[in-house]
Image (cartoon, rainbow, N blue to C red):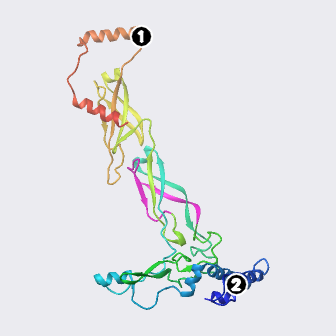
């Protein structure tokens, strides 16, 4: 790499004013608006970079003394050397430049599905806005035909070392280089499409297979389907948070489906058979004679498919006997005749029935 002083045409002892004058003279000669040649453009970039370094007192000082600054003479100890001196260990340890390639962040997408889709699972094509690999530089972060240059402050190490005096002698400390931010290289010609990031924001379609048995709040992990990392780093993960929409007829209790069926008083007395529409097809229900309100009819294997494992839950149907509220004169006479024939006892408190209250609680608290 060319010496910055030689690029600007000044001595190493040049004053800040002399450096500024040399830069202005070369800039007027090489600026793309004045000299459109490719060679002039490259020289203009080199001149500008040299001026950026030498015009900053700290960067110029570090450039003059190189990547490692010491007081000279005496014992120099790094932190690793100190620990190794007192606690033992191998040789010294060096830290190299950090990579521009980093893992992308994870993404969270909320997906709403219907209760009938939970029974057997479903497939979706999700449109997500995320970071994708830049198609221009393919993650290199540089303009086509160019590449990063070695940092002339840390000379590619990504670290700046300084010596500090301590009771134990001169202690050598290491910090990330402020010029290249610890990368060891500088991107002089960043990709115009991604602004030197190696990735851009874009929408992409992700096919999703949602298994049966999921429930609201469950998160599904899709490895490496999140956003791409800086400089084309590996993708993060995509997490799907499930929300099951409310259904007007059916509710859920674990892997069981719950529903309520309204039965006319006469059907409750005499019994009947009916067919109703379920989430996965027609359901045949037998109402036995004398059925009571709050009784539960269980239809085996018509519930939710187990999330992990085979088989399905049950469909549990709570019976609600509907007492007619409006009767004509003839209907009233028939009911009176029935009441007289049965000689029913007057209303009274019944003994506590744990089973009845348990059924009511399970059926209504889970709606």
Q: Secondary structure at mark 1?
A: loop
Q: Is residue 184 visible?
A: yes
What segment carries the magenta color? 200-226
Above or below, 214 against 237 in this view is above
Q: Quadrant of the N terminus?
A: bottom right
Q: Nearer the viewer, residue 319 or 25?
A: 25
Asked which secondary structure carries label 2, the reply is helix
Residue at the disc numbered 1: 328
Residue 327 lies in what quarter of the image?
top left
Q: Position of residue 100 (x, y in %)?
A: 52, 74
Question: Does 245 lie within the magenta span?
Answer: no
Residue 145 in view in this figure: no
| Left or right: where 21 falls relative to 333 | right
To which residue does mark 2 refer?
18
| Quarter-of-image position of residue 40 | bottom right
317 lies above or below 351: below
Residue sitting nearer the eye, 315 or 52: 52
Near mark 1 (Cα within 10 A), the count class, few <14, some 14-19 or many ≥20, is few
Residue 205 forms part of the magenta stretch: yes
Left or right of 64: which side holds 38?
A: right
Q: Which mark is residue 48?
A: none
**x%, y% of residue 217?**
41, 49
Residue 221 x %, y %:
42, 59
21 or 142: which is nearer to us?
21
Which residue is drawn at the image coordinates 23% and 16% (left, top)?
348
At horizontal 21% and vertical 26% (from top left) the residue drawn is 352
Residue 365: give x, y in percent of width and height: 34, 35
Task: Give the residue drawn at x 23%, y 19%.
Answer: 349
Q: Quadrant of residue 84?
A: bottom left
């Amino acid at each position: 790499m060319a010496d910055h002083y030689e690029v600007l045409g000044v001595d190493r002892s040049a004053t800040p004013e002399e450096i500024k004058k040399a830069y202005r003279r070369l800039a007027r000669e090489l600026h793309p608006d004045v000299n459109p040649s490719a060679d002039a453009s490259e020289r203009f970039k080199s001149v500008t970079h040299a001026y950026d370094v030498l015009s900053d007192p700290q960067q110029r000082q570090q450039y003059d003394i190189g990547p490692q600054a010491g007081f000279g003479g005496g014992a120099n100890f790094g932190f690793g050397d100190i620990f190794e001196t007192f606690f033992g260990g191998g040789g010294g340890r060096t830290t190299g430049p950090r990579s521009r390639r980093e893992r992308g962040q994870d993404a969270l997408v909320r997906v709403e599905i219907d209760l009938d889709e939970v029974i057997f699972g479903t497939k979706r094509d999700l449109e997500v806005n995320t970071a994708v690999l830049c198609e221009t530089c393919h993650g290199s972060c540089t303009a086509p035909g160019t590449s990063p240059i070695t940092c002339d402050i840390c000379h590619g190490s990504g670290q700046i070392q300084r010596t500090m005096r301590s009771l134990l002698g001169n202690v050598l400390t290491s910090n990330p280089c402020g010029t290249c931010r610890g990368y060891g290289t500088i991107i002089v010609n960043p990709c115009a499409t991604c602004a030197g990031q190696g990735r851009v924001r874009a929408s992409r379609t992700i096919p999703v297979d949602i298994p049966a048995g999921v429930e609201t709040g469950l998160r599904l992990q899709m490895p490496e389907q999140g956003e791409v990392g800086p400089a084309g780093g590996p993708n993060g993960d995509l997490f799907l948070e499930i929300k099951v929409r409310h259904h007007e007829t059916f509710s859920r209790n674990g892997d069981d489906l719950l529903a309520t069926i309204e039965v006319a008083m006469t059907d409750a007395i005499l019994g009947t058979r009916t067919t109703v529409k379920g989430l996965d097809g027609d359901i045949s229900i037998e109402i036995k004679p004398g059925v009571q309100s709050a009784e539960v009819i269980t239809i085996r294997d018509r519930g939710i498919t187990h999330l992990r494992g085979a088989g399905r839950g049950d469909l549990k149907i709570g019976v609600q006997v509907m007492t007619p509220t409006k009767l004509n004169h003839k209907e009233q006479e028939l009911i009176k005749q029935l009441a007289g024939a049965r000689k029913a006892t007057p209303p009274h408190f019944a003994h506590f029935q744990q089973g009845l209250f348990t059924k009511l609680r399970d059926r209504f608290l889970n709606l």
